[in-house]
Image: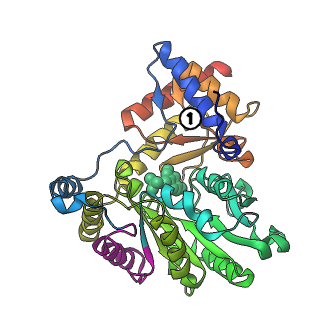
Amino acid sequence: MTFKGSQRLQQLGSAIFSEVAEWKREVMNQGVDVIDLGIGSPDLPPSSRILDAMANAVRTPAHYGYPSSEGSLAFREAVAKWYQYRFGVDLDAETEILTLMGSQDGLAHLALSLCDPGDIAIVPDPGYPIYSASLVLAGVEPYLLPLRAVHDFLPQLEDIPDDVAAKAKFILLNYPSNPLSAVADRAFFEHLIGYAKKHDLLVVHDLAYSEMAFDGYKPMSILEIEGAKEVAIEFHSLSKSFNMAGCRIAFLTGHADAVKALKTLKSNIDYGVFGAIQAAGIAALEEDMENDHSVSSVYEKRRNVFISALNDAGWIIPPPKATMFIWAPIPKGWTSRQISREMLFQTGVVVIPGDAFGAEGEGFVRIALVQNEARLLEAAGRIGDWLRTLE
Ligand SMILES: Cc1ncc(COP(=O)(O)O)c(C=O)c1O
């Protein structure tokens, strides 16, 4: 018997990621020392306090029953304290916070919990892939909101047709952004909240990179805007902020009814995050509140060395203000996919073609700063040597 999965699967995920993985395998099989700047997985470990908290909790027998699907009250209370410390936002741990197995988990199930088949949701292009995939899972029609360099990668909300704004259930945005490494200021968020109120639209903000910002810049939470909780929810993850991507813990905050919708769906799907991981999460948030345990300085140094080495080689890239990514405009005469492939085969450096994140990503590649400075310099050196051969 040959068995075909659902038609839904055909629409999931960009084929470009598998293509890049295939190129990488081919190059590795040739014995090349590959430097992978593709996937944004942190290369550093969590702090020793986080590791100790996890190790102790792993030995606690009470953690081996089913955890509660919404997360322990202790973890949600730590989140509430951290939101107050970091953003000055008050949250009710009982009704305005939901623990998640990574924000991917929450984002993947979001449309299923908020929308009915045939509804519309507004998502960014380019955008982090799960945004569109979650709409496919729920049978929701995407309205792709273009984010372009000419507008600093901020959406032109007024260009959204009125009938789309009227019908859409939510608008999803992400600043600081993956893949664009763009940022948004208070004026933009105020405008967005005003727009959402006018159109009776839920705003979903993905704040995965709030703790990875440079040159003294501190990204804000959308919930800092007055009245935002009436129309907005916000995802936050411990993956990037505290190097915990393998532990799978994140949370959703904001509008109580929307939080409850995802909580209800999730209580039918899983039993929540392992208690030892929640204990590690509490340690991460507490440590940050005690001594501002930011990963920013590591990535700022990586950004500086990598970008200046590429600049020296003639590839001028605007330095991002935040995130672990560089969204690099490509030299003329290439498509994103052509240059990514050729660069990998000629230099052994893996980057992701911009159109993997949507059609608007054509003309860019995404480079993840997930190697140490020496390896990044090596990568930039190889790319520079290769670019010089093309002159
Ligand atoms: C913008 C954005 N949102 C969400 C995620 C998912 O993070 P996690 O599921 O590890 O919390 C990522 C991971 O790269 C991301 O870049």
Residue 366 figure quarter: top right
The answer to whether residue 139 is visible is yes
Residue in the image at 68% along x and 32% along y: 337
**Nearest to the observer: residue 276 or residue 226:** 276
User: Which region of the structure is painted magenta?
Assistant: 69-97
Instruction: For the C terminus, give its image quadrant.
Output: top right
Q: Quadrant of residue 26?
A: top right
**Number of residues whose C-alpha sits closer than 10 Å to that of mark 1, classed few (under 14), some (14–19) or many (20 or more):** many
Amino acid marked by disc 1: Val
Q: Which residue is mark 1?
A: 351
Q: State the residue at coordinates (66%, 68%).
A: 115
Q: Position of residue 321 (x, y in %)?
A: 52, 57
Identify whether 96 is placed above or below 292. below
Q: Secondary structure at mark 1?
A: loop
Which quarter of the rendered picture does the N terminus lie within?
top right
Q: Is residue 176 visible?
A: no
